[in-house]
Image (spheres, rainbow, N blue to C red):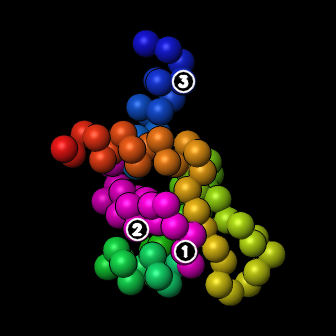
Amino acid sequence: MDKDNDELLKLTSYVLISKYREKTLKSIGDNVKIPTHIAKDSGIRTNHISKVLSELKSKDIVECINEEARKGRLYRLTDTGKEVLDTINENEE
């Protein structure tokens, strides 16, 4: 096993142990979304989404494009986040 793959597996596991993190990742997918839309898509309350997004951001799974905005911050998956999501989706097939 190479080190990158181990890291990917650790991050995937980190996402999977929380339904909120998993739903948030799936909600964003290939899109750029604001927290309100992520909340609506995933059925998670907005105040939880903010916490989940900051957790995912700290692991470099999502990134905020317009950090300076107070409202309507835009989030997308990082390349790592896309790999994590692909891994989750592959394991569900």
For residue 4, the mark is 3
Question: Where residue 75 sits: x, y (%)?
Answer: 60, 68
Location of mark 1 (residue) = 33
Mark 1 or mark 2: which comes first in sequence? 2
Q: Is residue 59 left or right of residue 16?
A: right
Residue ID at (46%, 24%): 6
Instruction: Judge by depth and name the residue closer to the eye, 11 or 51.
Output: 11
Q: Is residue 46 above or below residue 63?
A: below
Marks 3 and 2 close (CB-CB < 8 Å)? no
For residue 27, the mark is 2
* Kind of element beneath mark 1: loop
Mark 3 and mark 2: Cα distance apart in space: 25 Å
Q: Is residue 14 above or below residue 20?
A: above
Mark 3 or mark 2: which comes first in sequence? 3
The span shown in magenta is 16-34
Mark 1 and mark 3: Cα distance apart in space: 28 Å
Tell me if mark 3 has few (under 14), some (14-19) or many (20+) residues whose alpha carbon lies within 10 angstroms of its own: few
Mark 1 or mark 3: which comes first in sequence? 3
